Amino acid sequence: MKLYTSHRAPNPRRVRWVMAEKGIDDVELVDVDILTGEHKKAEYRAKVGVPHVPALELDDGETISESVAIGRYLEALYPEPNLFGRDAREQAVVEMWTRRCEFYLSNPLMLNVRHSHPALAALEAVQIPQVAEYNRVSAERFMKTLDRHLAEREFIALERFTIADIVAVVGLDFARLVRYRPPAEFENLHRWFDACRERPAAKAGV
């Protein structure tokens, strides 16, 4: 299998983090330079279908895109450690928190960075400061919710580390490109964030 990835982008990092947590080392990494538009070229789009990274090319030529979908596929092949839930209840809770963290935290932070970091102007038709600011405020609104949620628990979805934690921490870590840190008042969020970043797989996913 081949993983089309980019060290400049947060979504491929989610997949590399999943691979690192599971000790997957038999997937070839193919770097795609998104700043030069390599992901928009006809050859890549013909293979993947959309100008996005990451994408996982299977041995039979089938290609799967979207980071969480790729993570689910890898979990089916490499079930331990479990990151998506062991039974129906766990899977539903993990899915719920993964979607919340993606929609209300990671995506807004990514848009904040894309509309404020000079080097990422190549990815936007026009960088709009108001879009960056709106999304920062939106993300911090959810951080308040997440901080309360983490007051008496170590991880976001279950009593162990899951894909929900990966999605959230990668989004927050990406915002460090613009020297962003969550407000100091979110002490539980900071504790969780720092602990996640100390995991060995966090470094492997970079």
Image (spheres, rainbow, N blue to C red):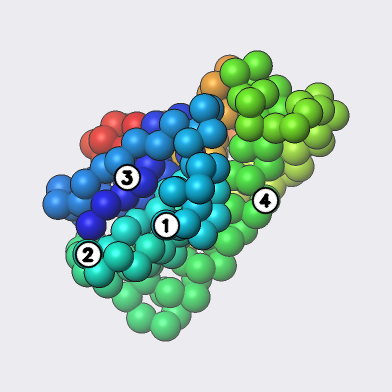
Which residue is painted at 68% across and 37% down in the image?
A: 111
**Extreme-right residue of the structure:** 130
From mark 4 to mark 2, how far is it between C-alphas? 35 Å
From mark 1 to mark 3, how far is it between C-alphas? 20 Å
**Can the viewer see residue 178 in this picture?**
no
Foreground pick, 17 / 159: 17
Disc 1 residue crowd, few under 14, some 14–19, many 20+, Cα 10 Å: some
Type of amino acid under label 2: Asp
Type of amino acid under label 1: Lys
Q: Position of residue 10 (x, y in %)?
A: 48, 39
Residue 47 marker: 1
Q: Position of residue 195 (x, y in %)?
A: 37, 36
CB atoms of marks 4 and 3 within 8 Å: no
From mark 4 to mark 1, how far is it between C-alphas? 30 Å
Disc 2 residue crowd, few under 14, some 14–19, many 20+, Cα 10 Å: few
Which residue is painted at 23% across and 57% down in the image?
A: 1
The residue carrying mark 2 is: 59
Type of amino acid under label 3: Arg
- The earlier-in-sequence mark between 1 and 3 is 3
The residue carrying mark 3 is: 16
Q: Is residue 189 above or below residue 71?
A: above
Of labels 2 and 3, the one closer to you: 2
Q: Is residue 121 above or below residue 195?
A: above
Of labels 1 and 2, the one closer to you: 1
**Can the viewer see residue 126 in this picture?**
yes
Of labels 4 and 1, the one closer to you: 1
The residue carrying mark 4 is: 104
Q: Is residue 24 above or below residue 61?
A: above
